[in-house]
Amino acid sequence: AATAEKPAPSPAPMPAPAQQPPPPAPALVAAAPTAPASPPVTLPAEEAALSTAPAAGVPSEAAAGAAKSSDGVAQALRALAKRYKDSDKTGLATCLKTLCVYIENLARNPHEPKFQRINCENKAFQTRVAAYDGAVEVLLACGFEEESGALFVGEEFVKSKGSRLWDALAKLKVMRDMLE
């Protein structure tokens, strides 16, 4: 009689060793010595929201032009807010919302003629924007020009569109949100 051998039981599977992240690679270039850190400068929320930094990779002349124009937007917004934030906060909020619509429409559709021109004699424009001293200056700082009862952006502006519209829109939204 042949006896059947039972196969030896297989050992229980061993749990896999815990994965540890690889050690950081050694630095190939020595870090440049740094100057002692200056204490941080704190600005009021409004100033910090409206401050700008030059965009990376932009040629210096273009960066200077963009910084200058965005500074104009920030200055115009600060002046507008200072004038009305205590005396007519609701009206200022409506003005800022309207400015956001104008700028966003143009930024999203720079080649659409209906967004390239604002009729300054329009009743809504008169009551929501023109009634607030400094609001038109915000549009001018964004690149609009005045001509015979209207604000418009020129053909050259439309071709380049410019990041300043998106920058201005971000500033407008921050200012608007601060009022709500």
Image (cartoon, rainbow, N blue to C red):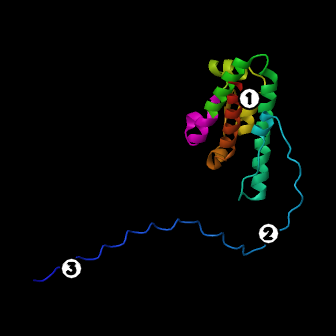
For residue 122, what is the image quadrant?
top right
Q: Report which quarter residue 10 is drawn in.
A: bottom left
Q: Which mark is residue 136?
A: 1
Classify residue 97 as left or right of residue 66: left
Of tags 1 and 3, which is closer to the observer? 3
Mark 2 residue type: Ala
Amino acid type shown at disc 1: Val
Decide whether residue 109 is among the magenta residues: yes
Specify start and end residues of the magenta stretch as a single range. 103-118
- Residue 79 position within the rendered picture, expressed as x and y whole percent measured from the top left: 81, 29
Up-down relation of residue 17 to residue 80 (above or below): below
x%, y% of residue 157? 66, 45
Is the residue 69 above or below the residue 76 in the image?
Answer: below
| Residue 140 seen anywhere in this rendered image of the structure | yes
Where is the C terminus found, in terms of image quarters? Answer: top right
Where is residue 162 shown, x and y percent of the image? 67, 47
The mark found on residue 5 in the picture is 3
For disc 2, the marked residue is 31
- The residue sitting at 64% across, 30% down in the picture is 118
Residue 52 screen position, x and y as percent? 77, 45
Closer to the chain start, of discs 1 and 3, is 3
User: Does dot 2 land on a helix, a strand or a loop?
Assistant: loop
First in sequence: mark 1 or mark 2?
A: 2
Of 116 and 40, the residue lying toward us: 40
Disc 3 secondary structure class: loop
